[in-house]
Amino acid sequence: MAGQRRTWDLGLQDAERLLQEAAGYKGESLWQDAWRRLKQDRGALWSLIFLAIFASISLLAPLLPLPSPIALDLQAEPQPPVLAFGDAGFDYEFETDDDYRLAYWELSWLDKRMVDARKAIFGDWQTGRWFGTDSKGRDLLSRIVWGSRTSILVSLAATLCSLLIGVTYGAFSGLMGGRIDNLMMRLVDIFYAIPFIFVVIFILTILSTDRSDLESEALVDKEKVFFLVIGAIYWLTMARVVRGQVLSPKNSEFIEAARALGASTPRILFVHVVPNVLSIVIVYLTLTIPAIMLFEAFLSFLGLGIEPPKVSWGLLAVDGTDAINPIKTFWWLVVFPAAAMGSTLLALNFLGDGLRDALDPKLRGK
Amino acid sequence: MSVLDVRNLAVRFETHQGTVRAVDGVSFTVEEGETLGLVGESGSGKSVSCLAMLGLIPTPPGVVESGEVLLEDTDLLRLSPDQLRRVRGNDIAMIFQDPMTSLNPLLTVERQLTEVLEIHRGLSRSEARKKAAAGLGDVGIPNPEARLDAYPHELSGGMRQRVMIAMALLCEPKVLLADEPTTALDVTIQAQILELMGALQQKRGTAIVLITHDLGVVAGMSDRVNVMYAGRLAETAETRALFARPRHPYTEGLLTSVPSLTDDPEAELASIDGQPPDLADLPPGCAFAPRCPYVGERCRSEVPPLARVDRDDAGRVSACFESARLGRTEVAGG
Amino acid sequence: MIAFLLRRLMWFFVTAWIVVTVSFFLMRQVPGGPFSGERNLSPEIEANINAKYHLDWPAWKQYLHYVGPMNLDDKGVFGGDGSKPFGGVLTGDLGPSYKLRDFTVNDVIGQSLPISMLLGLVALMWALALGLTAGMVSALRPRTGLDFAVRLAATAGIALPNFVIAAFLIILFVFLIPLFPVAGWGTMKHMLLPGLALGAPRAAYIARLTRTGMLEVLSQDYIRTAVAKGLPNRLVLLRHALKGGLLPVVSYLGPMTAWILTGSLVIEKIFRIPGTGSHFVNAALNRDYTLAMGVTILFTVLVYGMNTLVDLAYTFLDPRIKLEES
């Protein structure tokens, strides 16, 4: 058999060429790669922009020239949306704490300053009833914007709560391994089988009927219990997911490879394990926040959620459904809160799906 | 007369990187009872050609651009979907690479065998079961009756590939397309499976198209060999002649990169320089030119056509301008 | 199989025990009894009522009486009259309702559960019918306008609270196009709309599961084998793809039961259906602790039972899964 025989000795020149070639393959970090792919996903990108705008509006609500979300204007029935530009009806003066409470409710220091700034900029001017009013004559647009603050705050706080418990529990279980891991996961299995929602309702009813008693004993503030309790339900999945992630790279081949190359344990943990866990956690967050917003709405519906005068999307949606009657349809009371809630949750879902695809290692580099 | 006559088959894929010409004008024939080896690196278009013959190219992104696939006198590419369906698994059958994933894990072996007979032969379930058991016996599965009730995961890899073969041969097809049938198996099992295929072919006169990247398999099994490179045929020859004297530089490279027991153990292993070409961005001339030690000016600008390279053998063709130089001069290694 | 069921039963008891114990002692933590809020009760009557429901006993004794491992009877005697080893919850006796006088919790559940079950069944049918159809259509025509529309609707269905969906349905099918009665219970017509409202978010989820599952299966090698065998598309789909593609939906049936039970609280309230869910809400709001706890226990049993059934069904559908390993 005739043919060429190429010996394979690597000369200095070859080595240099190889190095140059290697430098040409610019490594893309997980996040750069994910961001690049997220940008390609139109739905996810628009969702992100939409959510950013919504979050800013919600955060800056006290600055906006909106009517008071609680000012009553007793009329026979809810007024439909009008396209009036605005009026000079915001005739509050803010000097003492009670003044703020008259137009809003208990506000934080920062919110009060924003209200001051608004008064300085816009004076008495406020927007018209663009979204109509509710059955007590309160401006719906203002209520939706202010409600978004509560809903976002509740869901973020509760999600963080579940995140904290879940990640700690899952990571601990995964890192300990063996019998402890087994026991901890068995416990999670048991909790999974408990219909927690009923237990939560139970706890909340107990708390709400004896609110005065408990608060006088300086035990709890209902909103805090709310975060804690929701966090305590939603941590289960998080714990499982994190444990799985901690376990799988722990034994996977690229960790072996990193170890063989002499990488130190902290380096392995932060360079290889944490990014993997983090990507899953981020995806999970975008899916938990909507779940908790829905849960808040659910509890509000049962009268166990946020309490007036504060307002949340859940409460608004409940007001809307309550106003349904066969004689006259106050459509704006259902449509606007549902649209605000629906579009936010829709965007979060889209973003979550997009992030999941973008962070999926199987699709990397594509 | 040849059982299978493929003429000028071309398949392209529309991808994000651009149009990929996976198969570009491939022609070959297979005679009754003959085994034709299709050899090449991954991405050379060997599997895609076979999938295209059966209409199994996913569209989109795949498009069968042109060509004829004549099974006896019928052009498979011109058949209606329903007519083609009747041919598949009946006159022409296919075995896939990985028996682990190619059998449905949720159905029993019996269900997956008998359905072929029910569809193509119109047999009743019990008749089909009898025939399926006989088919399993033919491929050397002991206690076939009992195996019929098994699920794929209860069988070993070799057994599963035997089941796949039995399934493909149930309707006694004229042509069997075997896409790397032994790649996923242990070496000892590989030999058994190849032997089995050879024996069955002898008995039934089935024509086999054997896709592989393993030259050892080709040497042992096939009568003739098609070497493919970057979607085109590089060389066609009788197996013996090909191994004796390759007439395409790529074939030569493949043959020299097979280690042999008689090699000097101290010498480095031989390999073909460079990377397989990017199918979305082929060079204008011969696709092998960038890696070819014989490359000339013409090779870089013009695609070499398939041409006869042996006065005595009409079946011996090579797509190389420099084929005459091959094997004459020793090329010094770099 | 028997071993699997026994192990499940054991874990069920552990779970149920945790639920009962935690909720029992949480309840006991509340200052004031269930009757202390009622206005026009003289102290004597209140003491009488407390005695009747054994609220004057120490907590541990009430707990033993309620759970009933030693058959602590009404007089506070262990072992009762000696006729049975257990009493209380262990024998399925959930005790008297605190607020619906003359009714035991079992009576209330016995009356309302069939209604809720029927509603749940209608919701399940809706969810499966809509979800499977939409998911299949979407999977078989991926990346088309139809697929996009289905996915959008499915995401919206997941993103909206079910009382909002119910509101839209009522506006649409009761007021605008009067097809259905607004509320109440009795005929088939009364069931369809609440069933739809209850099932819609689940339908959306099932559609997503079906789509992903089917797309995943359709990309498998064995589907290519089936096509290469010459099977007609119908058979490839029904025999080879459907089973694997629907496995995720089957495993979702367990959690779905829990979701439907939860949703029923809201839907039964909106449509004024006298089911177990609305009893639970009322009981919780009125501090009818035994009733609320009874329903919680009942729902635990239902969800647990459904999950076990799903696991069993799974082993029949997927021969690779063995019960002993789970």
Image: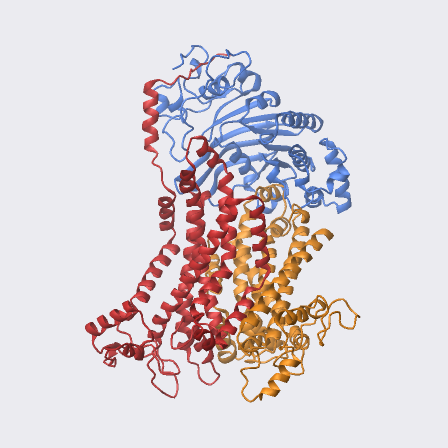
Chain colours: A red, B blue, C orange
Q: Residue at x 63, y 29 (%)?
A: B207
Determine whether, in the image, residue A178 is placed left or right of residue A85.
right
Q: Is residue B245 above or below residue B171?
A: above
**Which image quadrant for residue A82?**
bottom left
Residue A41 placement (x, y as % from top left): 39, 52
Residue A250 placement (x, y as % from top left): 49, 40
Q: Is residue A114 above or below residue B327?
A: below
Q: Residue at x 52, y 45 (%)?
A: A176
The answer to which of C257 and A258 lies nearer the viewer is: A258
Residue A226 placement (x, y as % from top left): 46, 67
**Which image quadrant for residue B283?**
top left
The answer to which of C17 and C262 lies nearer the viewer is: C17
Q: Residue at x 48, y 83 (%)?
A: A326
Is residue B207 visible to the viewer in this orientation of the structure? yes
The answer to which of C304 and C118 lies nearer the viewer is: C304
Q: Residue at x 53, y 80 (%)?
A: C178
